[in-house]
Image (spheres, grey):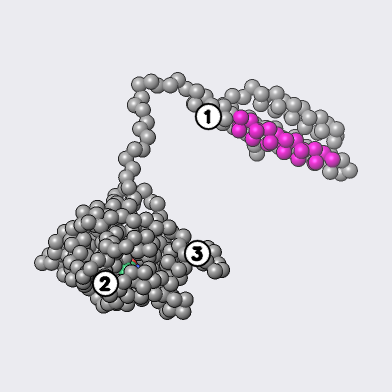
């Protein structure tokens, strides 16, 4: 009796394989699957006869039945894949409709908001007579700290931790601000100096108003008789040209080792349903302030480090945070948005 079942299993397999080769659609394939492997299918019918198989032959017949089932399932699956590929290939080779409009490549990109803001600041500063100077992002410790009156044990270094890329006698690091460009310019030329230096800077910082990589524009003006009045007038001029009149500007005393006296500037903003907005005199009250830059009169120790005569010249310097200006311009209250590369966000700015 066991032989009879084995033979039927063999016939079933051969029949299924033969029918499978003729099948060209997913529906036919499904019908075949049901007919052979379904609950009331041919395989089940054969297996019902297992009861009549002598006990000694049952393991052998049972194994054979399982094998046939597994083989049929594998063949059906493979055929389904083949049909799917064939239908995709057919769709792809469909006739080309020459009347369809072409697909336009995306050409509506624009500058990243941080670049836009840098450009606007530089345009205003060059208009005021500053020329643009560049410095490296990997900077020597000497330029980034020492020459700026920030020796190794100075506590101000704590706020500007960064990656040191070269140890030893000539330490190199990712610059923490654009101020080392001041040093490069003054070492390269005698006074008068009137430059701005844009660029990326790096710090161990991260929250909604602090990014580990951000952008500054440094400004340096050295000549005979430069005073704090020049500093204040110049910066107010830059900010008003940037944001229009009526903004709330707060000069706040501060400390930098390379300027004396030093100040920081905050801009007043208020919040509405859409986020933060620059507050304008007479229109909205200031509900909060955002620091946008540090500045001050160049410290005589810096002039000494670059070989300028501190008794003959004076100067002011500033370091503007571009991201902060962009936050206020576009009402962005989380600095990280600028670097998430979400086009839905970036295309709005
Ligand atoms: C400085 O970096 C000084 N070099 C500025 C300076 C230049 C002072 C010349 C005097 C003379 P400070 O660390 O405060 O200072 O940074 C300047 C500005 O950069 C801040 O006002 C802020 O607008 C921006 N800024 C600082 N840290 C971050 C940060 N992690 N992410 C985004 N913007 C920042």
Q: Which residue is mark 3?
A: 172
Disc nearest the viewer among 2 and 3: 2
- What is the CA distance from the residue labelled 1 to the residue labelled 2? 81 Å
Which residue in the rendered view is the most extreme toward the left? Answer: 282
- Residue 226 is left or right of residue 33, and the answer is left
- Residue 342 is left or right of residue 233, and the answer is right
Q: Which residue is mark 1?
A: 88
- What is the CA distance from the residue labelled 2 to the residue labelled 3? 33 Å
**109 relative to 235, above or below:** above
Residue numbers of the magenta segment:
60-82
| Number of marks | 3
Is disc 1 surrounded by few (<14), some (14 to 19) or many (20+) residues within 10 Å?
A: few
Q: Quadrant of the N terminus?
A: top right
The image shows residue 307 at horizontal and vertical percentages of: 36, 69
Q: Residue at x 37, y 35 (%)?
A: 105
Q: Judge whether residue 230 can be spotted in this image.
A: yes
Residue 312's disc is: 2
- Contact? badges 2 and 3 (CB < 8 Å): no
Q: Residue at x 30, y 59 (%)?
A: 196
Quadrant location of ligand 1? bottom left
The image shows residue 283 at horizontal and vertical percentages of: 12, 65
Residue 201's disc is: none
Quick one: 51 or 313, which is closer to the camera? Answer: 313
Label 2 or label 3, whichever comes before in sequence order: 3
Instruction: Characterize the magenta stretch by its predominant secondary structure.
Output: helix
Badge 3 marks a residue whose secondary structure is strand
Q: Judge whether residue 337 can be spotted in this image.
A: no
The image shows residue 120 at horizontal and vertical percentages of: 25, 53
**217 relative to 75, above or below:** below
Quick one: 76 or 319, which is closer to the camera? Answer: 319
């Amino acid at each position: 009796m066991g032989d009879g079942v084995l033979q039927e299993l063999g016939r079933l397999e051969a029949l299924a394989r033969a029918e499978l080769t003729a099948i060209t659609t997913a529906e036919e394939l499904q019908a075949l699957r049901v007919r052979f492997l379904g609950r009331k299918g041919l395989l089940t019918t054969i297996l019902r006869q297992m009861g009549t198989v002598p006990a000694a032959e049952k393991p052998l017949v049972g194994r054979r039945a399982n094998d046939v089932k597994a083989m049929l399932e594998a063949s059906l699956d493979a055929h389904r894949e083949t049909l799917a590929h064939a239908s995709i290939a057919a769709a792809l080779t469909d006739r080309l409709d020459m009347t369809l409009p072409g697909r336009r490549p995306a050409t509506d990109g624009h500058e990243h908001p941080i670049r836009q803001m840098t450009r606007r600041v530089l345009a205003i500063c060059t208009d005021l007579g500053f020329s643009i100077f560049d410095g490296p992002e990997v900077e020597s410790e000497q330029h980034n700290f020492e020459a700026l009156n920030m020796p190794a044990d100075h506590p101000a270094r704590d706020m500007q931790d960064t990656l040191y890329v070269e140890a030893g006698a000539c330490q190199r690091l990712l610059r923490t601000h654009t101020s080392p460009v001041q040093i490069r310019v003054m070492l390269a030329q005698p006074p008068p100096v009137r430059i701005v230096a844009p660029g990326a800077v790096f710090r161990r910082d991260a929250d909604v108003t602090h990014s580990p990589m951000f952008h500054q524009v440094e400004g340096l003006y050295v000549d005979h008789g430069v005073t704090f009045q020049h500093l204040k007038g110049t910066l107010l001029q830059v900010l008003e040209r940037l944001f229009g009149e009526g903004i709330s500007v707060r000069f706040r005393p501060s400390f930098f080792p390379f300027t004396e006296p030093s100040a920081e500037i905050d801009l007043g903003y208020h919040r509405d349903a859409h986020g933060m907005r620059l507050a304008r005199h007479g229109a909205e009250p200031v509900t909060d302030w955002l620091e946008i830059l540090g500045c001050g009169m160049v410290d005589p120790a810096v002039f000494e480090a670059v070989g300028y005569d501190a008794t003959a010249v004076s100067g002011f310097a500033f370091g503007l945070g571009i991201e902060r200006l962009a936050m206020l311009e576009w009402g962005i209250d989380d600095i990280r948005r600028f670097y998430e590369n979400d086009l839905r966000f970036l295309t709005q700015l």
